[in-house]
Amino acid sequence: MKILFIFHNTSLAGGANLSGMSLIRGLRARGHEILAVCNDAAGELTCRLREEGFATTVAPYHVAWPARPVGLRQWLIYPPKALKYRIDNLKATRTLSEIAGKFRPDIIHSNSSVIDIGSRVSRRLYVPHVMHFREYGFRDTDCVMWHIPNILKHPLQYNIAVSKDIRRFRSLDLRGHCRTIYNGVLADGSVRINDNPDRYLLYAGQITQAKGVEDLLRAYAMLPAERRGQYPLLMAGSTGNTEYLQYIRELTGSLGIASDVRMLGHVGNVPDLMYAATALIVPSHNEAFGRIIPEAMANGCLVVGRDTAGIREQLDNGLEATGREIGIRYSDPARLTGILSDITSGDISRYAGMRRSAADAVSRLYTHDSYVDAVESYYKSILQ
């Protein structure tokens, strides 16, 4: 098969692009031809694709709609910004249609549901289009998703949902073809467990309000100062919103925990941080899948997660697969302080069984091979 694979941006910090990369690596290894599409010639993802020998093309497109405006100034500039996005995307559609016409893909695959350029090219060339639903929209990313209803009406539209919850949220069963396919996170045999982890708590992900970082900081601040000194909170992640990052820094100061919270920014050694951590905290309000959870579990890290959306689904999947809880759940943010106190108050070996059950679950459910198998099977069913 020939697949035109379209990324929504060129950052390597987000789970969507990491999952997309693992998918096209697996597809190429099985003999399929990939033409990767990016929107920034100098982006880190574009450079990585070229380093790995992928055929790559660049078109200057944007997400379908600018992010939800916050504040008067952003509301004022939103209409002209949205118009510019539309004009740029129409130009990029023409360019990409010409490129795709020469490549002659069997499938066009949009790696994220925040873009509509793949659907536009699909309609011009009358080639099946697969959209990967990795986002809720306002609930998790502040993305505006007004383009989705129109895309779902097209007869050549096919959909992949990264969880049953997002499939249900988007009513994808009522709007055409859909399969739920979990992201592939680990290679077979790549599980490792550290029986003597270091003393620190870890947050890994974007620094945004939707990720629940404020809840985490407030819960952490309720620990005794001596305990925080023994167990610092490492925050590995970045944000495109410098104002929000400054707010978080000010919040740590006002809570009196600035000396205990280490803002690492974007780092490349997150798996090693997981392997050595006492626990990973996942406080997201709504997580479509939460790639970071099976990543942590594959590195033997105890996971504490908010019992909602994709986080709940993963914990439920693990419970069904192993017969045991594979992480610590909480629903009430106030309960998080008690959990943090418990896991930092004694011997981490108390959770050895949970960590091993978690590693067993993710090694069954979220391997690269099962991920590529499922997507490849879906492609074949579309082309039958």
Image (cartoon, rainbow, N blue to C red):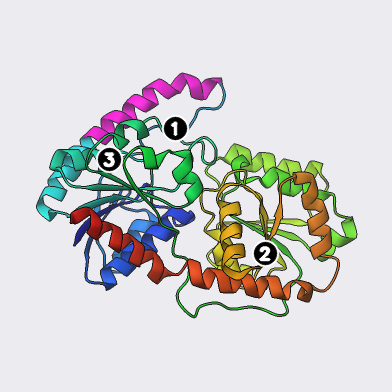
Residue beneath disc 3: 117
Q: Nearer the viewer, mark 1 or mark 2?
A: 2
Mark 3 / mark 2, whichever is N-terminal? 3
Q: Residue at x 48, y 37 (%)?
A: 137
Q: Of residues 87 and 107, which is closer to you in this image?
A: 107
CA separation in Å, label 1 and label 2? 35 Å
Q: Which residue is mark 2?
A: 325
Image location of residue 147, percent across then percent down: 35, 32
Q: Toward which corner of the image does residue 301 lie, by quadrant?
A: bottom right
- The residues tagged by marks 1 and 3 sit, at their Cα atoms, a distance apart of 15 Å
- Magenta residue span: 72-90
Q: Are marks 1 and 3 in contact (CB under 8 Å)?
A: no
Neighbourhood count class around disc 3 (C-alpha, 10 Å): few under 14, some 14–19, many 20 upward: many
Is residue 15 toward the left or the right of residue 376 in the image? right
Q: Is residue 151 depicted above or below 370 in this figure? A: above
Q: Earlier in the sequence, mark 1 or mark 3?
A: 3
Residue type (three-letter) at the residue carrying disc 2? Glu
Residue 41 in the image, given as x and y percentages of width and height: 30, 52
Disc 1: CA contacts within 10 A as few (<14), some (14-19) or many (>=20): some
| Residue type marked 3 | Ile
207 over 48 or under it: above or below: above
